[in-house]
Amino acid sequence: MQHHFQNLFGFKSDDQISFDLPETTRLDPVGLRADIDAANLSEMWTMILTLDYAVEDVADLPPEKQEEFLNVMSLLLTAFNR
Amino acid sequence: MLTRPASQFTELGTKVIEQGLADPKLSEFYEAIQSASHQATPSSLKPYINYLSLCSDKVSDMEPPPIFYVGRESSQRLLFGDQWATPQASSGPASGLRTPDPELEKASADAYKAALNLQPYYGYARTLISLNGETYEIAFERLIVGINPAPTASYQICAYFGVIQDLQRRL
């Protein structure tokens, strides 16, 4: 998957900055949800999913959005040291 | 001649918002969270989620809490770019997502402490930031509020609404 960015400074992704995400790094939604529940952060899973992505179940998201959401949840665990 | 310190972080207080002197969208967000029983709730975030950055309650004297969510239109995403805002889990920062300028991090910590004491923080900042080997002067206003995700939750999150007012490259 190619990622591109441009910020206020006008830095744009091109060949040097875009990158490919290896298949092996994809997050497992079931395992991550279990980690979130075990960390008592379940409210945040529901909150971000419904407020930003407007779905009730992560399985209802297209693959790219699902991956984006799961990365946010992974950051959530890190942000709470869990 | 006017002399200015290189960096200035000033709390203006939320009365400035009530007096109509803040950014209109930021003011709208403030009004929404105030009308939600005088406490920010997850549902009060809905219309504004794209403009917010969300972080945990793990603040220290030296650093604001780590960020876990950066809205699509948030000032931090506009400033630091999409790649910073969406690190891949496998290669992401082990200590959580933080802004790329350590001085900016240190100067921001107190505002988050106030917000986590359920006192919304509204202030103005003008400072230098280093990005990609270049120095920029940035001026921004920011509102930070603490939120209880649920009545039974044992933690808080902080919602950051920033508005960039000026951005100049230092030569």
Image: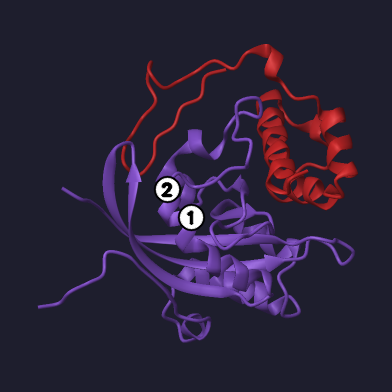
Q: Are marks 2 and 1 in contact (CB under 8 Å)?
A: yes
Query: What crowding class fits label 1: few (fewer than 14 Cα within 10 Å), some (14-19), or many (20 or more)?
Result: some
* Chain corresponding to purple in the figure: B
Task: Give the Cα distance between marks 2 and 1.
Answer: 6 Å
Both labels 2 and 1 in a single chain: yes
Amino acid type at mark 1 = Glu
Give the colouring mode of the picture.
Answer: by chain
Q: Secondary structure at mark 2?
A: loop
Give coordinates of residue B43: x percent, y percent: 75, 62
Q: Amino acid at mark 2?
A: Asp
Question: Which residue lies under the disc numbered 1?
Answer: B105
Q: Along the horizontal axis of the image, is A62 left or right of B124? A: right
Residue sitting at the far left: B1
- Residue B153 screen position, x and y as percent: 85, 61
The quarter of the picture where the N terminus of chain B appears is: bottom left
Question: Label 1 marks which chain's residue?
Answer: B
Q: Which quadrant would residue A39 be assigned to in this image?
A: top right
For this rendering, which residue is in front, A48 or B132?
Answer: B132
- Mark identifier at residue B101: 2
- Asked if A8 appears above or below B43 in the picture, the reply is above
Q: Which residue lies at the image location 15% right of the left edge and 77% below the top edge?
A: B2
Residue at screen point 62% across, 55% down: B65
Q: Secondary structure at mark 1?
A: helix
Coordinates of residue B17 in the picture (x, y in percent):
49, 80
Position of residue A1 in the picture relative to residue A30 (left or right)? left
Mark number for residue A1? none
Which residue is depicted at the point 68% across and 74% down?
B117
> In the displayed image of the protein, which residue is found farthest to the front?
B61
The red one among the chains is A
